[in-house]
Image (cartoon, rainbow, N blue to C red):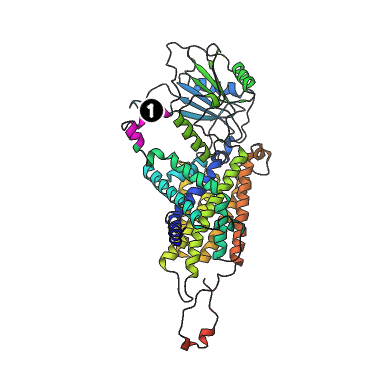
Amino acid sequence: MNKSFRQSMAWLHTWAGLLLGWLLVAIFITGTSAYFREEITLWMQPEVHDSTLQPGTVELAMAALNAKAPDAKSWDINLPGPRQAAVELRWQPAKQPKNGGRQRGEQMLMDADSGEVVAPRATRGGNFLYRFHFELYGIDRLWARLLVCLATMFMLIAIISGVITHKKIFKDFFTFRPGKGQRSWLDAHNATAVLALPYHFMITYSGLLLFMTLIMPWGIDAAYEGDRRAFFSEVFSRGETPARPGAPEEMLAIGPLIEQTEARFGKPVERIQITNPNRDNAQITLQVDRDPAVTDRQRGGDPTQVFQGNTGDLIDTRIPANDPVSPGWRIYNFFTSVHMARFADPLTRWLFFLFGVAGSAMTVTGMLLWVSKRTQQLRRDQQPDRALKMVSGLNMTSITGLMLAIAAYFLANRLLPVTLTAREDREIQIFFIVWLMSLVHGLLRPNRQGWIEQVAGASLLWLAIPVVNIFTTASHLFTPLAWQHAAIASFDLVCLILAALGGYTLWRLQHKPLPAKARRTRTPRAANTASSKQPAGDTP
């Protein structure tokens, strides 16, 4: 491979990673947190923490739906699990909207012990971070997704060009030289890139494929003559819903059906779907082993049994591996599941989380390496220009500023009044206010001092989260209630770990030696005076 080609790839790698690097950091960090978005939401709604699944929970849920929506088109009951404390009740109203559009369903949360309706504090929870990583916030959804797609393309180009450029990529993976300035950043960049290289390629490529209809719609338009609804209807069709009957009829008790399903699959029922409840053609669908990493929109289905609601007759038994689904569904489901870790157990999700952290670190170290390299190229008497100062400030904002904003978002959840109007919007506003403040701070303060101050602030905020939680809720690290749901206690522990890492980083910044000597300004040999023999100063 000739030298000029490698040089071209090196140039492409540098600029592909830098141009949208700040956005990529935000995408990576918020996307990594999305592996635990349900756990985050659970922590941010302490009002449901004392809800525990009981033998009579299903009957309480059925009674609540009968009282709330007896004539609904369908009912949906999600029972508590490792990632959910309260019972989630959903229903589709029977009344059609006046404009002829799609009828939106309604939902509520129920205490699994008492059957009472639970009204937790208003919050977007982990869903805000999840949706931010591919839709951003505050701009048109279409343009936001296109921008994220563009950033993802740049990331894929940077990964491929980086592999081509680096001749000793796997050898250098085992090399790390701390305290060497630019060399240390390069070693860290190489290590985090190689450590999870298959993950980086997978997460980037699958992310692009999930938006294939947005960035590559021409094949669909050609095959379906521009009718994209027909495409989605064919690919994601799940069969026909039974038509509305003519007469109401009481349903059988659901308890024996649950026992039959659990005996068939050897696992507890975790989701109940009822179409046409309290009607003569009601169907009761019981699902088991709903993997905690699978989102609410079931893509491949779960082991399921379907019963006739008024007679209890078994209509169908479905096992996902045997379901005749379309190839398009299988492909889409595969990439969606891989990208979002829907298939994963808790241990695998933690592994994906660590890979996501490595991806974030890879992007961060690459951006810091760019600034470090150009700072060391400055002469002794030369100050950074506005462009370099701006890049350094944007680096600070995208890294420490984002961590400050996320911590502030969680703190706002605990400190804002529960009855505050539009409370969930206020949490998000605080997130962006803190992020904007970090940008202004990063652009105005000297580089080194700015990093020290923002790292110190982030460390204090992350430490404050579990401390404030002690005084505002009954489910903190020192109560059995928090350990009843591992997700609640784990959240506080992760906050403490992040605070500790921030403290260590702060210590390193304060005790780190100044960068290596900068280049001296060249002078003629004749000017070899006493002043030229003085030691060169260090770059601040």
**Residue 225 among magenta residues:** yes
Q: Is residue 513 above or below residue 124?
A: below
Q: Secondary structure at mark 1?
A: loop
User: Residue 340: horizontal and vertical position, in percent?
Assistant: 52, 39
Q: Amino acid at mark 1?
A: Arg
Residue 175 location, quadrant: bottom right
Q: For the point 31% across and 31% down, which residue is it? A: 225
| Residue located beneath label 1 in the image | 102
Q: Residue furthest front?
A: 1
Q: Is residue 7 above or below residue 236?
A: below
User: Residue 422: horizontal and vertical position, in percent?
Assistant: 45, 41
Q: Which residues are magenta?
A: 219-241
In the image: residue 449, left or right of residue 268: left
In the image: residue 106, left or right of residue 55: left
Residue 432 in sight from this viewpoint: no
Q: Residue furthest left?
A: 225
Residue toward you, 411 or 323: 323
Q: For the point 68% across and 44% down, which residue is it? A: 478
Residue toward you, 419 or 86: 86
User: Residue 387: horizontal and vertical position, in percent?
Assistant: 41, 64
Q: For the point 53% across and 62% down, which residue is it? A: 451
Q: Residues within 10 Å of mark 1 (few under 14, many from 20)?
A: few
